[in-house]
Image (spheres, rainbow, N blue to C red):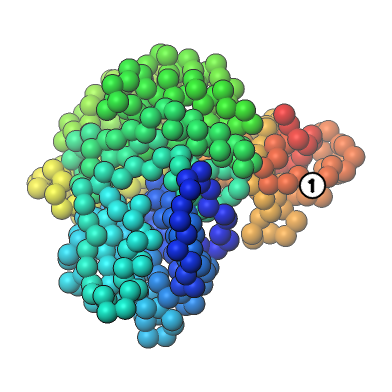
Amino acid sequence: MSQPLIIPRRAQSTKTTKVHRSTTTIGFVNLGCSKNQVDSEIMLGSLVTEGFQLTGDPKQAEVVIVNTCGFIEEAKEESINTILEHGHLKKTGTCRVLIAAGCLAQRYQGDLLKELPELDAVVGTGEFGKIAEICRDLLAPKKRHRRLWISQPPYLYDELAPRLRLGKQHSAYVKIAEGCNRNCTFCAIPLMRGKQRSRPVESIVAEARQLAAEGVKEINLISQDTVNYGVDLGLREGLVRLLRELVKVEDLRWIRPFYLYPQQVTDDLLDLYAGEEKITKYIDMPLQHINDRMLKRMHRLGDRAAIEALVDRIRTRIHGVTFRTAFIVGFPGETDAAFTELRDYVEQAEFDRVAVFLYSDEEGTGAADLDEKVEREVMDERRNAVLAIQESIAAAKGRARVGSILDVLIDGRSAETEGVLEGRHEGLAPEIDGAVFIDEDSTSSTHVRHPLPEIPSPKPGDFCSVEITDAAAYDLVGRIVRNSVS
């Protein structure tokens, strides 16, 4: 999803930096996942610290930076189209320099410069910390030449890096590691991000304290392989150790780890989820498939029996857990029987949230050379079939919540409906899940079970007790029954 810079927030840093004052305006477009968003925030923080001026309108920018995604075919197409769209600003706007950064840049490097003459520079994932220097170099008189800034990606930000956060003031992403050591045959991430490199526990905790001091109530821990955090640092059960330190950070309310690979999930980790109030009862675990042959061809560890046992163990040990997963349809060799097994499993398992991705051949991955390719039309039909089943499951789960009272984090007013607030309970992650919609006038209604005097409207970042009064497929509707839940 394209995410242009809209409202810049100040860059945070404890470093003493010599600022190079500049009147040059920067326009920035972020594409892709939350990990890309953190990279964008670090680049923006560096640019602000170095004195560049930011604008939310790329048409007014002298330098336009597109932080690209190269994960799957659709993401690559979006990145290319965005570069082309902003390339026109060299004729219609004030753009002097156009930069492609990020995953697509790292992966295709010189091909981008060759095929896209609009580009002035390609900046890989190992050069984010140099973005201000790169911009100054490209703008220098008599030094204008198109070039690559590519290295093996050693860059890993720390708590001292300037950061200008996008999105909500009360919720933040914290990248705890970069790269991946897995060998999934469908995935190009190691080609773009390298081997896993974990940040030290102390660095992550220091960043969490800084964020809490800024008013952040929810931190979302992200990486390519979160359950494997710290293995490269020699840590045993590194994620457990990290979480035990993070729960000590005052003023944080929710800590939400993303992307748990379905191995190395220990009882210690599950007990921590179950016993620590600050750790959301929310498991994000892409399973990718359930058919044994597909799992083997994907180079995923474990088989159906192991997956089913793990899912049961998670649900048994973490009371009320919300389980989000993801599957790939159309992987080479996925027969009608293999897909039917997957579809039936989704219906049987009744996950809370399911994402379904279409397989795409990615150069340099093991799956690209596999035989038994599946037609795109068949993939679309399979995805739609799984999503239809999951929508029915989600709707039933939503209806079961009607009448319950949930703690909800208020995200702000709805952008689509006047007089409506949006929020999330702990089983709803930011951006990828649904929302709880709250009519600001509903608290004084006499037609609800717990009529109350009018309650002052909460602010973004407040926690409220909300009675659920209605449900849709993925969203809930409710009314506030108590404000400022501690």
Please tell me which residue is depicted at 52% across the width and 18% down the height of the picture: 274
- Please state which amino acid type lies under the numbered disc 1: Ser
- In which image quadrant can residue 448 be found? top right
Residue at 90% across, 40% down: 453
* Residue 111 visible to an observer of this rendering: yes
Front residue of this view, candidates 463 and 345: 463
Residue most extreme to the right: 453
Q: Is residue 225 left or right of residue 429?
A: left
Report the front residue among 254 and 26: 26
Quadrant of the drawing holding the N terminus: bottom left
**Residue 250 x %, y %:** 62, 28
* Residue bearing mark 1: 457
On-image quarter of the C terminus? top right
Say above or below: 146 vs 431.
Answer: below
User: Residue 328 is drawn in which quadrant?
Assistant: top left
Q: Is residue 84 visible?
A: no
Residue lying furthest bottom: 91
